[in-house]
Every structure is written in C-alpha cells, then in structure tokens.
C-alpha cells in the first residue's frame, strides 16, 4: 500500500520540467526581489517599484515572451499573503526573469523536511 501511495510522488518529482507557458504555476527560487507589473494601490508605478517574494512563493504565469531567452516573464502572486511592505501582496502582478523561478515544488525535500520535523534531531 505504501508503494502505491508513494509511486506518483516519486514519478512526479523525477519527471523533467517543460518550458514555462501561460497558466503554469511557478515558485520563487529562494527569496526574490521582483518588479511590480501593475500598481496595487492604484497610484502610478515608479521605475523601481519592487516587492519581495518569500521562498517557494507560488505564482500563476500571465505572460511569457515568445523566444523564452532571458526576457521578462509576468505572473500573478498566489500564495504566502502578507500585507506588510516590502512583501508582494496577494494577486499582485510581478515581473521576473526565468532564472528566478522553478516549475515544480521539491516534493522529496518537502517530505524529508516534514519527517525531520516529526522525528526531529534534538
């Protein structure tokens, strides 16, 4: 029974990622400073309006450049809500480079962290 429950988890974590497309969910690679794409408060954006994404913060991609080199990708922040500045507010549209995000959460490391928390080293 354990094998049946863990097999999809292992297969998912070993599968390669594809190119980032519109509608995909991506996660911030560590703590990232990103540019706001649209104003959250309704005031005009300044050239250096930025906010901070928490590590592994989920976002839904809204725009991907056609050549996918290292151009700017736009996405809407979905998780880890915080109303405090400098953190990105929920549903804010942000701009970032492809190297600042990854597509799949690290399932095996999340399971490992959970097991360490349960059976912690003291």
Image (cartoon, helix red, strand yellow):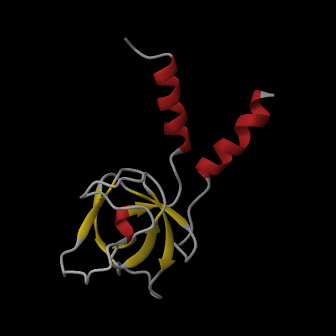
Q: Residue at x 27, y 80 (%)?
A: 43
The residue closer to the viewer here, 93 or 120, is 93
Quadrant occupied by the C terminus: top left
Task: Pinpoint residue 104: horizontal percent, then vertical percent.
Answer: 53, 55
The residue closer to the viewer here, 76 or 72, is 76
Q: Residue at x 40, y 69 (%)?
A: 92
Q: Residue at x 33, y 61 (%)?
A: 88
Q: Residue furthest front?
A: 42
Q: Residue at x 30, y 57 (%)?
A: 87
Q: Residue furthest bottom?
A: 66
Count of labels in the image: 0
| In this picture, residue 71 sits left or right of residue 2 | left
In the displayed structure, 65 sits above or below 11; it is below
Quadrant occupied by the N terminus: top right
Task: Pinpoint residue 9: horizontal percent, then vertical percent.
Answer: 66, 43
Task: Pinpoint residue 2: horizontal percent, then vertical percent.
Answer: 75, 28
Task: Pinpoint residue 50: horizontal percent, then vertical percent.
Answer: 24, 69
In the displayed structure, 83 sits above or below 92; it is above
Please tell me in which quadrant of the rendered image residue 99 appears. bottom left
The residue closer to the viewer here, 87 or 108, is 87
């Amino acid at each position: 029974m354990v094998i049946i429950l863990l097999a999809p988890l292992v297969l998912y974590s070993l599968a390669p990622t594809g190119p980032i497309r519109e509608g995909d969910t991506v996660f911030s690679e560590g703590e990232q400073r990103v540019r706001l794409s649209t104003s959250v408060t309704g005031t005009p954006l300044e050239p250096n309006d930025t906010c901070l994404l928490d590590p592994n913060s989920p976002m839904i991609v809204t725009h991907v450049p056609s050549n996918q080199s290292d151009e700017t990708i736009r996405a809407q922040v979905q998780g880890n809500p915080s109303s405090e500045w400098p953190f990105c507010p929920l549903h804010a549209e942000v701009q970032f480079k492809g190297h600042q995000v990854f597509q799949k959460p690290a399932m095996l490391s999340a399971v490992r962290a959970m097991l360490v928390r349960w059976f912690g080293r003291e």
